[in-house]
Image: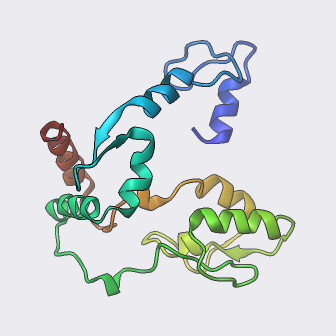
Amino acid sequence: FCTPCLQECLKPKKPVCGVCRSTLSPGSRALDLEKQIETTETTCNGCNKKMYLSKMRSHAASCSKYQNYIMEGVKAVTKEPLHSTRSFPNRFTFPCPYCSEKNFDQEGLVEHCKALHSMDAKQVVCPICASMPWGDPNYRSANFMEHLQRRHRFSYDTFVVGDYDADEDDMMAQVLMRSLRDK
């Protein structure tokens, strides 16, 4: 949940879950879920290494065999042949739009701007959005800091791997087929 949506769920005298509408206790954490993530073992679909679910995201980011496994799925649902890597815009590092310091990943740019530019009211173009196929490289955000915190709390590449032009319905079908085939 994003913060504004979660806050809406917590506003009533008896706060409710945003999904199932059951009563919530503000401040209580999903400890059973955290424990399950920390203690459930899984296997990397690329290198077959065993690890806990809590370690899978960081492992997947550095496992070249897992990246190949993902790209096989992307190729299976891409309508046109994959473009050469040179034709992809850089969606991994970004310059600060305020001071032009370079090579921030999304989280690093958010932290940098929060630390050094939180009071800067200058309207700037979001370098993350400008790198996306749907992004407008000329759009200046009226409140860049709010935009960063609402739009870029996660990396798009967590959800879109490699090809932003892959057919979404085909991709969903491929994911379902692979989830049935995988352990």
| Residue at screen point 63% across, 16% down | 24
Of 24 and 139, nearer the camera is 24
- Labels in figure, total: 0
Say which quarter of the image contains residue 28.
top right
| Residue at screen point 71% across, 21% down | 26
Residue 170 location, x and y as percent? 19, 53
Q: Is residue 159 visible?
A: no
Image quarter where the C terminus lies is top left
Say which quarter of the image contains residue 152.
bottom right
Of 126 and 70, nearer the camera is 70
Q: On the picture, is 61 further left or further right than 18?
A: left
Say which quarter of the image contains residue 129.
bottom right
Q: On the picture, is 34 further left or further right than 126?
A: left
Q: Is residue 44 above or below residue 15?
A: below
Q: Is residue 89 visible?
A: yes
| Residue at screen point 47% across, 73% down | 91
Residue extending furthest front? Answer: 50
Image quarter where the N terminus lies is top right
| Residue at screen point 20% across, 40% down | 179
Q: In this view, does 85 lie above or below 117?
A: below
Residue 150 location, x and y as percent? 64, 52
